[in-house]
Amino acid sequence: MALERLLCMIKKEFIQIFRNSKMRAIVLIMPLVQSMVFGYAVTTDVKQVTTAVYDQARTPESRDLVDRFIHSGYFSVKQTIHSDREMDELIDRGIVAAIILIPPEFSGKLASGTTVAVQIVVDGTDSNTAGVVLNYAGNIIRNDAIEILRKRTDRPGWEATGVHLQTRAWFNENLTSRNFYVPGVIASIVMLVTLLLTSMSVVREKEMGTMEQIIVTPITSAEFIIGKTMPSIILGFVNMIFVTLISVFWFDIPVRGSIVTLLVANGFFLMTTIGAGLFISTLSDTQQQAMMSAFFFYLPAVLLSGFMFPIANMPDVVQAFTYFNPLRYFLIIIRGLFLKGVGVAILWPQILALFILGSLVLTLAVKRFHKNLA
């Protein structure tokens, strides 16, 4: 293998990548845009829920309960309503997401020590958000009840109720969805960039008519493949490091595990994406066909990886298919390293799976490739 020919091939590939304005945007701009989108826009955190209050009691006790909702940080009371018709209209039009309905006998029943019901009307269009809102509201009302018992019995609330509840979340202490999603962007960016670049590498020579020129050169098949894939490998590592830096220094997401383990796992992951891209390139006749095939591979891989939807919630048949998805294993590794701080002793099954899948896919792609026009 001639180093000079190999370096010339790698240089040629970099020139072709950065000559194309669309590819420059994919390589340079897309990692930043996706990091910002998933860091700020894509979130499952429920805060400042638009809320209306239907206070039929209008007593100091009912106002204290409303104040608890306002100062919780989760509810933003936009208006007060005075009739059932207003309540239905606000929910139907989507003006508010929740309504707090306090009955007229609220204070009287509290004074007599009997049970009183407070109704929380929630827009259930988004079932996930509705469930979280109901959970927040239940906690606020429960804390209000404990405070009332404390004042009456002159004892701590937990002694008055017989229950002392404390919650603690491991690894993501504040339950911030950003800490879950942004590290996953590393895997999705690396896969998309390397898949697109590699899938169009060989077919580009066919479409531009330069394959004949390459055939008559002394370059070997090994040099041709390495020269075609090496820029994608380099850019894959660059994007991984770039998004990691954004995660740590911009979004303050901790990296509790080993960076060396992350680099090694990224290398094995690149074996799968480079192999898949090269295989697509050998099967395609045009760059457009290669790009469409790459997205056809990429989108199901993201959906079946656990990046947005838990794999445990999927049907058993679908879960079986996820074992052939390299993105599934890389996401477990990344989140384990970022949030849990675990190492090879815990992550070795995922690292081994990436190595096996990468070896198989890359071997299949190399055997499929031939230095000819077929």
Image: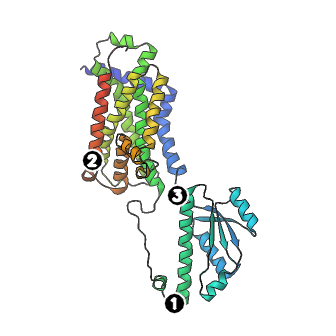
Residue highlighted by disc 2 = 349
Callout 2, which amino acid? Pro
Q: Is residue 124 above or below residue 182?
A: below
Residue appearing at x 47%, y 22% in the figure: 287
Q: Earlier in the sequence, mark 1 or mark 2?
A: 1
Q: Earlier in the sequence, mark 3 or mark 2?
A: 3
Residue highlighted by disc 3 = 45
Mark 3 and mark 1 in contact (Cβ < 8 Å)?
no
Rendered image quadrant of residue 145:
bottom right
What number of labels is visible?
A: 3
Query: The C terminus lies in which quarter of the figure?
Result: top left
Residue appearing at x 27%, y 38% in the figure: 356
Q: Earlier in the sequence, mark 1 or mark 3?
A: 3
Cα–Cα span, label 1 and label 3: 36 Å
Q: In this view, does 124 lie above or below 54?
A: above
Q: 10 Å neighbourhood of mark 1: few (<14), some, or many (≥20)?
A: few
In this view, the residue in front, 243 or 69, is: 69
Q: In this view, does 296 lie to the left or right of 126?
A: left
